[in-house]
Amino acid sequence: MPEPRFTIDVIAGDGIGQEVVPAARRCVDAAVAAAAGISLTWRERDWGSDHYRRTGRMMPVDALETMASADAIMLGAVGEPGIPDDVTLWGLLIPIRRTFDQYVNLRPVRLLPGTTSPLRGIDELDLVIVRENVEGEYSSIGGRFDRPGGDTVAVQESLFSRSGTARVARYAARLAASRRGTLVSATKSNGIIHTMPFWDEVVAETVAETAPDVRLRSVLIDALAAELVLHPHASDVIVASNLFGDILSDLAAALAGSIGVAPSASLNPERTHPSLFEPVHGSAPDIAGRGVANPVAQIWSASLMLSHLGLDAPAAALYDAMVATMSAGTLTGDLGGDATTESFTDAVVAEIER
């Protein structure tokens, strides 16, 4: 039987992405080597803000076409001072998500060793946010319009389709069925009178059809934000629109001790296109180049990538080695330790090789 072969496109991007991506690659290579019988090819893509300064584009014109043959994409971070965030985001990340139909943004939240929740008495947290990733509030429909008298109006249209809402709800329902059997749907149907009642209707129908034993709660987004703080164990799997999921996942990561260790996966579940894996944190230009960036979020994202590719053994080995390293007290400065990016990575690799 031929060995499984995978091609990974790598976009280290900006800031600390240039440091944590090579760290995660080392760990992935070690986990794959330990599993044996797997061939992994990395394709370097030097895209991001430096590319923008040279060419006026965050990535080449044919970037999406050249990435289409990859099995997965590993991204570090994009964004640098001096370049508007909408330029960096809409010039690289959002076109990748939409062209490759990465409609599920999966964000697991756990209280890892060495992290401390800001909430009193919380020593365990394990939930997953399933964010709709290509529709919703992050639409390009709209614009700015001048009105008589010198006033200006900005219009931003949200886009919710039945098929798009149903497929993310279906994914979330199946995930909930494999865990505690409960699903929370974030809504604002009391104030947003068209899209959110539609969201509620489609989510309820889809969950009933897909996983009838899953218990579904529809919770207003403001109440859900408060519930996450006051009763963080009340939720297990949360499904939310693009904007609500983005905000809730950062809140949940902060409750787990640090947004700096939070991973994400932008998935095309059918695997007709490559999926993308990246840390939730940004490019952190204030610490870039100092060798102190925490690589945990990137390593955890890489573990999600291996799992998505069906490489369950190396995915588990990578995640377990990362957790064991943190449990042993090897922590970077943001978590109160003195490990550097390199020394933390060395410890994870050594743990894998053991």
Image: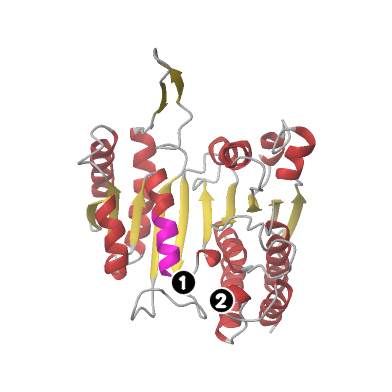
Q: Is residue 269 above or below residue 316?
A: above
Q: Quadrant of residue 138?
A: top left
Q: State the quadrant of the C terminus.
A: bottom right
To which residue does mark 2 refer? 335
Q: Quadrant of residue 127?
A: bottom left
Magenta highlight range = 248-256
Q: Does residue 20 appear to the left or right of 257 in the view shown?
A: right
Which residue sits furthest front?
149
- Residue 229 in the image: x percent, y percent? 31, 66
Please tell me which residue lies in front, 21 or 225.
Answer: 225
Q: Main secondary structure of the magenta part?
A: helix
Please tell me which residue lies in front, 185 or 177.
Answer: 185
Please tell me which residue lies in front, 222 or 204.
Answer: 222
Q: CA distance from mark 2 to mark 1?
A: 9 Å
Q: Is residue 352 above or below residue 64?
A: below
Which residue sits furthest bottom?
328
Q: State the quadrant of the N terminus.
A: bottom right
To which residue does mark 1 refer? 257
- Residue 90 in the image: x percent, y percent? 58, 37
Q: Quadrant of residue 325?
A: bottom right
Residue type of the residue flagged with mark 1: Gly
Pointers 2 and 1 in contact (C-beta within 8 Å) = yes
The residue carrying pointer 2 sits among few (fewer than 14), some (14 to 19) or many (20 or more) residues within 10 Å by Cα, namely some
Residue type of the residue flagged with mark 2: Leu
Q: How is the image coloured?
A: secondary structure
Q: Does residue 100 appear to the left or right of 234 in the view shown?
A: right
Magenta stretch holds residue 131: no
